[in-house]
Image (cartoon, helix red, strand yellow):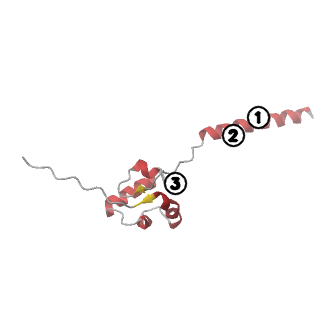
Amino acid sequence: MKKRGIFCALGVTFLCAFMSLVATVAPAQKKPPAKPINLNTATLQQLEQLPGVGPVTAQDILDFRKKSGPFRSVNDLLAVRRITKARLEKLRPYVTVGPAPAPPAPAKKP
């Protein structure tokens, strides 16, 4: 009977230690951006703040923008690899489409 109690106590101790280890190793839940992010001016770091968007998807959004030009609508995200209708609906409150940044002015010749 005493052996059973010892094994039970060891099991509980092990379980508690394991749970605390998992809690410290598990990544913290991302906090979504406070205001919507403009898809036409967002940086990689800003896009990674979006729920369900990691570095790969953020880079896909930037690559699409570079290749296809500025987004005209939030719905244009559906053309980006890895963005499904379900993911778009989760992103919609956190993204907007505003004017693209102006291209740099050409350098004046002396």
Measured as percent of width and height from the top left, residue 69 is found at: 31, 62
Q: Secondary structure at mark 1?
A: helix
Q: Nearer the viewer, residue 15 or 103?
A: 103
Q: CA distance from mark 3 to mark 2?
A: 25 Å
The quadrant of the image that shows the N terminus is top right
Mark with earlier residue (3, 1): 1
Disc 3: CA contacts within 10 A as few (<14), some (14-19) or many (>=20): some
Residue on which disc 1 sits: 13
Measured as percent of width and height from the top left, residue 52 is found at: 52, 55
Q: Amino acid at mark 1?
A: Thr
In the image, is residue 105 above or below residue 15?
Answer: below
Q: Which mark is residue 19?
A: 2
Q: CA distance from mark 2 to mark 1?
A: 10 Å
Q: Amino acid at mark 2?
A: Met
Disc 2: CA contacts within 10 A as few (<14), some (14-19) or many (>=20): few
Q: Residue at x 52, y 64 (%)?
A: 89
Q: Tell me the quarter of the picture where residue 25 sits.
A: top right
Q: Nearer the viewer, residue 26 or 4?
A: 26
